[in-house]
Image (cartoon, rainbow, N blue to C red):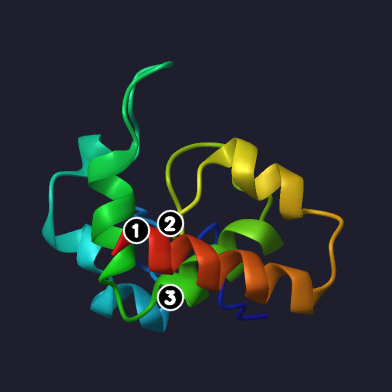
Amino acid sequence: MAMDSEFMFNPGDQYNTPKTLPWQDDALCAQTNPEAFFPEKGGSTREAKKICGQCDVARECLDNALETDERFGIRGGMSERERRALKNLGPQAVTIAFEKAQAKNR
């Protein structure tokens, strides 16, 4: 059974590398320093969030992080703590929070 998940592996891939999701090809973070998206505890998230603020697929990234309960890094312009606060909110509240974050991060 084939599933579109970053946690599934490509059959026949000799290196058994994770499969990417279609929107990930357009993600700005894939074209920048990945360390910015995983700051040390207490480190600045500003650089990563600014990149997310310009990214065309930031919402897809945020939705994926919420769906998969991603616990590390900046995803969709939000930290793990910010995403955790959205976890039990409905889609409309997530949209409002995302739009506010994107406006702030631009």
* Residue at position x 24%, y 59% in the image: 51
Residue furthest out toward the top: 41
Residue 32's place in the image compared with 34, above or below, is below
How far across and how far down the image is residue 53, in percent?
A: 32, 65
Can see residue 9? no
Disc 1/disc 3 C-alpha distance (Å)? 24 Å
- Mark 2: few/some/many CA within 10 Å (<14, 14-19, 20+): many
The residue under label 3 is: 21
Nearer to us in this view, 29 or 88: 88
* Residue 34 marker: none
Write the residue at 50% across / 76% down.
Answer: 60
Task: Say what secondary structure mark 1 lies in.
Answer: helix
**Mark 1 — residue?**
105
Label 2–label 1 contact, CB within 8 A = yes
> Of label 1 and label 3, which has the lower sequence position?
3
Q: On the picture, is 81 further left or further right than 29?
A: right
For image coordinates 34% across by 73% down, the residue present is 24
Q: Please, what is the three-letter code of the amino acid marked with disc 2? A: Gly
Q: CA distance from mark 3 to mark 2?
A: 18 Å
The residue indicated by pointer 2 is 77
- The local crowd at label 3, few if under 14, some if 14 to 19, many if 20 or more residues have their Cα within 10 Å, is few
Task: Tell me the element at label 3.
Answer: loop
Q: Nearer the viewer, residue 69 or 95?
A: 95
